[in-house]
Structure formats: structure tokens, C-alpha cells
Amino acid sequence: MAGGMSTSVAPLTSSLSKLQAVNGLFAVYKKQGPTSADVLNSLKEALLKEAGVANPNPKKRKKQMLKIGHGGTLDSAASGVLVVGVGDGTKMLSSMLSGSKKYTAVGELGKATDTLDATGAVVLEKEFEHVTKLDIEEKLKHFVGDIMQVPPLYSALKKDGQRLSVLLKKGCKVEAKPARAVKVYNLSLQEFSPPHFTLHIECGGGFYVRSLVDELGKAVSSCAHVKELIRTKQGQFTLEDDTLQEEHWTLEHVLRSLHPCPEPEDALENGAKPSDCNT
């Protein structure tokens, strides 16, 4: 019986050891609906389940047995690239937070919402029939380069350790954060079919597409909110080539798409600190 037990336990221990030995970055596809934290928890659960780990207390056990994090929150209503760090790869995620990102956003003229996207309540309606394609293209020029932007009230930013969005849902009074410097590398109008318009955006860290669309609506003497938002690129990870769909959240697929931590000498050549990765 002892031999039978060792035969059944050893493969599971081996699978968990292989999973815990993974260090680096990869990207998964986040669908509309769940939060980025929800996606991360589902990913942890899938990988640990494959490794044979039972989870009587899933959140506690998953944190203890697998070190994992994501490199920048996507709104629950948004979809697209979510970069994940595993093991020592979590130390590389700061570069994802500050690095370049690309988005495709569909805006809707004529309605403003409290969340600045389609999940919120409509707080203002204005005429939009006067707005032309040329109007939007001209106003977009003012949002390119180094600009100042006020983050949305409903956001992952925190006050006293709690997210502003959570405080607002609790009925707490929340003041807008001050405008901050953000960078927009490229901004273009792809489609214009009133009341809808589609933008392609390449920006740096800390940029909010919802704030852009809200400000653009005001700039054309109307109002607007984000109807749909897709992150198409984050750092070196693209939506088409690098993201793992949920059915591929397995150790095999993670290893295939993994960008491992660089060796210490490589990290230094790229300007990273020795503490950015441990090999």
C-alpha cells in the first residue's frame, strides 16, 4: 500500500514543483465582465488544479503556493491583453505598468455616464448631430504628446487604502484626483458613424481612455462615453500573437509563451537593476 501511495503522490508533487519553478512574463486574454483580479484568480486556480492541488480555502492556498500578479488593471468592461508575471517574473511587472500600451476604443456621442463607460448611469445627454468627422480629428490633435489628464472617479486609484470605485459604490463622497502628466504617442480616428466613433490609441502608463473620450466629447460641444474598450498591446505582448485564451491556461501553454527573466548580466545591459529579477 505504501508503494501505491508514493506512486500516486509523486507525479502531483512533481507537477507542482514544475509550476513553482516557472519565472517570467506571459499574457492572457481578459474577456469583458470579470475584473483583472478575477481573471488572475481563475488563472491561478486552473494552474494549481492541473498540478493536483486541492483548494479548501482557494484564495489563501493559491497565494501561498503560486506567486503571480498582473501588470496593469483592465476595467471589468474592457477586454484584451493582460500581462501576467509568475514567480520572479512578478518583479518585472513594474515595466509593464509604465510601458507603452495600445487600445481600440468605441465611443458614443450624446451621452455621458458617471463611470465614463457603458457600465454607468447616464448623467447627461446632449445633441451630437453637429459633430463632424473633421471636428473630432481636429480636437484629437490636442490630446497627443505630453498632456495633463484627470483620472476618472471610478478607478483603481486609492484613497486611504481603498479603491475610489469601491468607496463610491459604498456611497462615500470622493473627490477627483488632481490632473497628472501622461503621454500619448499616437491617436487616430478609425471610424465615424454617429453617434459612434472608433479610436486607436498608443499611450504610456497611467493613461485613462475613459477620461480621453469624456474630454473629447466636451471638446466637440457635446458629451461622450466609452462603449467598448480593447487593449491590443502591452509592452511586447500583442492581442493577436501572444495572449492565451482561457482554454489554454495550462502549464504547457504558459511555458510555450513565457518570456523568462533575463540573466543578471542581460538585465544590467538593458538598464534594469539587479533586484528586478532573481535567477
Image: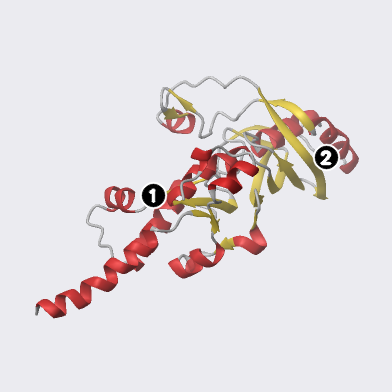
Residue at image point 82% right, 44% down: 188
Amino acid type, label 2:
Glu
Residue 115, how many percent across, how many down? 57, 35
Residue 74, how many percent across, how many down? 55, 45
Say which of 52 and 119 sits in front.
52
Q: Is residue 106 left or right of residue 70?
A: right
Looking at the rendered image, the disc whose residue lies closer to the viewer, 2 or 1, is: 1
Say which of 58 and 196 sits in front.
58
Could you tell me if residue 35 is visible in this image? no
Q: How is the image coloured?
A: secondary structure
Q: Which residue is mark 2?
A: 129
Q: Which residue is mark 1?
A: 67
| Quadrant of the image occupied by residue 5 | bottom left
- What secondary structure is found at the residue carrying circle 1? loop
For label 2, the crowd category at 10 Å Cα-Cα, with few meaning under 14, some 14 to 19 and many 20 or more, is few
| Quadrant of the image occupied by residue 18 | bottom left
For label 1, the crowd category at 10 Å Cα-Cα, with few meaning under 14, some 14 to 19 and many 20 or more, is some
Point out which mark residue 145 bears.
none
3D distance between C-alphas at marks 2 and 1: 52 Å
Q: Is residue 65 above or below residue 71?
A: below
Say which of 59 and 254 sits in front.
254
**Residue that lies at the very extreme toward the right in this rendered image:** 134
Residue 15, how many percent across, how many down? 34, 68
Whether tag 2 and tag 1 are in contact, CB under 8 A, the answer is no
Q: Is residue 150 above or below residue 66?
A: above
Could you tell me if residue 32 is visible in this image? yes
Amino acid type, label 1:
Lys
- What secondary structure is found at the residue carrying circle 2? loop
